[in-house]
Amino acid sequence: MGKSPTADFTSVATVDELQPGERMVVELGRRWVAIFNVEGTYYAIEDVCTHDDGPLAEGELEGCVITCPRHGATFDIRTGKVLSAPAMVDVKSYDVQVRGNDIQVKPR
Ligand code: FES
């Protein structure tokens, strides 16, 4: 439809700012987005737990599963899917691409 596939992506960081095993939180629009580098693959989810707004990027990450530091709900950072209570609702997730040195995200 005449739109380049990168049109809706926004640069939020550079690759050297986010090494494998690291995570960062950026502001995008009026949302906070947690970006993860898991062994060279990037994932991004909203940094707000759907249970009670816990800061997900401060939780423990095992593989691709993040544990909310507030009450322990777990989410898959690849999809935003909720995996365990007390959260019941998936968290918003983002597509991530790398263009040159830029890490770019787009809401799904
Ligand atoms: S705020 Fe995340 S589990 Fe309660």
Image (tube, grey):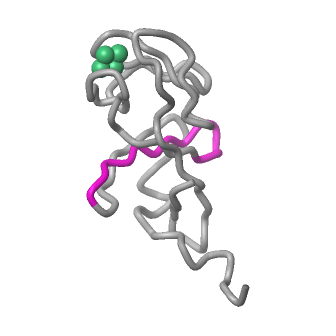
Name the one closer to the observer, 66 or 99. Answer: 66
Q: Is residue 75 visible?
A: yes
The quadrant of the picture showing ligand 1 is top left
Up/down of 89 relative to 7, above or below: above
The chief SS type of the magenta part is strand
Up/down of 62 relative to 11, above or below: above
Name the one closer to the observer, 102 or 69. Answer: 69
Question: Where does the image place residue 34, in percent across and percent down from the top left?
Answer: 40, 43
Q: Is residue 18 left or right of residue 58?
A: right
Please name the residue shown 34% across and 21% down the image.
Answer: 51
Please name the residue shown 53% across and 70% down the image.
Answer: 9
Farthest residue, direction bottom: 2
Give the quarter of the figure containing the C terminus.
Answer: bottom right
Q: Is residue 34 magenta?
A: yes
Name the one closer to the observer, 9 or 101. Answer: 9
Q: Which residues are magenta?
A: 30-42
Q: Is residue 69 visible?
A: no
Residue 30 sits in which quadrant? Answer: bottom left
Farthest residue, direction right: 1
Up/down of 40 relative to 3, above or below: above
Name the one closer to the observer, 35 or 101. Answer: 35
Q: Is residue 55 magenta?
A: no
Please name the residue shown 35% across and 38% down the image.
Answer: 47
Question: Where does the image place residue 41, in percent across and percent down from the top left?
Answer: 64, 45
Please name the residue shown 46% across and 50% down the image.
Answer: 18
Question: Where does the image place residue 8, in percent across and percent down from the top left?
Answer: 54, 73
Give the quarter of the figure containing the N terminus.
Answer: bottom right
